[in-house]
Image: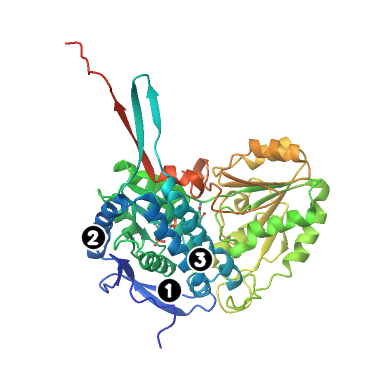
Amino acid sequence: MTHPAQPKASHFVNGAYVEDTAGTPIPVIYAATGEEIARVYAATPAIVEQALASAQAAQKIWARMTGTERGRVLRRAADIMRERNHDLSVLETYDTGKPLQETLVADATSGADALEYFGGLAASLTGEHIPLGEDWVYTIREPLGLCVGIGAWNYPTQIACWKGAPALACGNSMVFKPSETTPLCALKVAEILHEAGAPAGLYNVIQGMGEVGGALVTDPRVDKVSLTGSVPTGKKVYAAAAAGMKHVTMELGGKSPMLVFDDADIESAISGAINGNFYSSGQVCSNGTRVFVQKGIKEKFLTRLAERTATAKLGDPMDESVNFGPMVTENQMNIVLGYIETGKAEGARLICGGARAEMDGYYVQPTVFADVTDDMTIAREEIFGPVMCVLDFDTEAEAIARANDTEFGLSAGVFTKDFTRAHRVIGQLEAGSCFINSYNDAPVEAPFGGVKASGVGRENSKEALKHFSQVKSVYVRMGDCEAAF
Ligand code: NDP
C-alpha cells in the first residue's frame, strides 16, 4: 500500500502535479524509523523548462492584478493552511522527523502567518511623490520578475512560505526547489496557493539536488535567488547569481552566542539555552550554540541544565508527548556524532548525552559540553545538531569580544535582569537577529537574517518587501526641456 506521505507526483508546475520518472530517483526516508516512505524524481531539463516558462508567463498576469487582489489570494491560502494544519503537520513530521508536538505549532502555522502578513501588506506597496519646485519625481515599487527559492531541510513548509509570500505579495512569481532531503511539504504549499486562486505557474515546486538548483540560478530569465542553506552553498549560489547580476537573499548558517550574566534568572536562561539548542533536535540555523555563562553561576547553571535535559522525552515523533526527535538523516546523525567525539578528544567536559540514543531511527542524545574553549572545533564550527557548548567568562567586555570572534553573525542573546546592560551588550554584538531574556522567537513581523558570513538581506517583516521589489524613479518636467545646443 502506498504510504500516506507519497505525493501525487514529484513536481507542481503550471497549476498541476507533473511527473517525469526519467529524473534521478530521490527516496524519502522517515528519520524516526529509517524506512523509505515516499519517492520523487529530480527534475529533468524538460521539467525545469516548464517551470521557468510557466512562471514567467504567470508573473505577467499576476503583476497586472491590484495589490488587494493579490493579497486576497495569499490570505485565502493562509486560511486553507490553518484549516489543514493537522495533516500538514503530520506530513512535516514525515518529511523531517521533527516531533508532531513542534510541527503542530511551528511549521504550517508560521507559513500561514507569512501568507497572511504579506497578503495584508500587498495593497500598501506604493511609491513616493518628491516635489522639485514646479517639477516632480514619482517612484513606482515594481516586482523583480521571476524569483527562485532554494530551501534547506529543517523547515520545509516554513521556508517555502517565508520566500513565497513576500515574493508573491510584490507581484513576482517563484520557482521553489526544496532540499532533496525533504521534498514533500513545499508541494502542498504550491497546491494550496493554486487552490486559493493563484494563476497557474505562479508558484511552481520542482525537485532535485544542487544540479537543479544550479540550473535555476544560472537561467537568464531568473531575476532573483533566495537561498536558505549552509555558508559553502551560499558562496557558490551567490557567485553564480552575481554572474547574471541577479538580486539575492542569503539565509545561511551560524554559531550564535548566548550570554548569561550572574544576575540572570537561571531557570529562564536555561529555558533559553534549551530552546536555542535542542528544539528541532538542534537543527536550527539561529541556535545559540555557544552559551557563555558568567563564572559566579556556572556550576549552578550546569547542574540545573543537566537535570532539566534529562527530562527530554525522545521517541515516536507522532506521539504528541514526545518533545525530542531524530536527526533528519543518517548522514546528519553521523556528522553530529563525529563532532561529539571531537569535543571529547579536544578536552571539553561532557555534562550529559554524548552518544546515539538506543532506539530505531537517527536519534542523538541531547548533549552538553562544559569548559569549552574558544579554539575548540565544537566552539567554532556549525554542528547543526543537539550539542550545546557552555563556555565561561569573567567580564562583560571579554564576553562581547569572544562572542564576536566568529565568521558568523546570525543571532545572539543576552540573559540579565539589568536592562541597561542588556541593551548595551546587544548593541555591540555582531548579529542580525537578537534576543533579550529569550531565544529563537521568529514572528513574521520581525526581520530575520544575518550579518558577516551568515547572510545577505532579510526575510519576514516589511524589510522582506524591499528584497523582492525594485524602485523605478520617474522625473516629470512641467516646462520645456532645454539643452546647450
Ligand atoms: P545546503 O547548503 O547543503 O543546501 C541548501 C539548498 O541548496 C538545498 O536545497 C541544496 O540542494 C541546494 N544546493 C546545494 N548546492 C547548490 C548549488 N550549487 N546551486 C544551487 N543550489 C544548491 O544546506 P542544508 O540543506 O544541508 O541545510 C543546512 C544548512 O542550512 C545549515 O548550515 C544551516 O545553518 C542553514 N540554514 C540557514 C537558515 C537561515 O535562515 N539562516 C535556516 C535553516 C538552515 P540539495 O540539498 O538537494 O543538494
Q: Which residue is mark 2?
A: 49
Which mark sits nearer the N-terminus, 2 or 3? 2
Q: Position of residue 359 (x, y in %)?
A: 61, 79
Q: Are marks 3 and 1 in contact (CB under 8 Å)?
A: no
Q: Where is 83 relative to 367, above or below? A: below
Is 442 in front, or is 387? 442
Q: Earlier in the sequence, mark 3 or mark 1?
A: 1
Residue 183 quadrant: bottom left
> Which residue occupies 30% across, 67% down?
15
Disc 2, SS = helix
Q: Position of residue 485 (x, y in %)?
A: 16, 11
Residues under labels 1 and 2: Cα distance? 25 Å
The relative height of residue 377 versus residue 305 in the rendered view (above or below) is above
Whole-number angstrom distance, CA of label 3 to CA of label 1: 20 Å
The residue carrying mark 1 is 28
Q: Residue at x 72, y 58 (%)?
A: 271
Up-down relation of residue 281 to residue 245 (above or below): below
Say which residue label 3 marks. 108
- The amino acid marked with disc number 2 is Glu
Q: Earlier in the sequence, mark 1 or mark 2?
A: 1
**Helix, strand or loop under label 1:** strand
Q: Are marks 1 and 2 in contact (CB under 8 Å)?
A: no
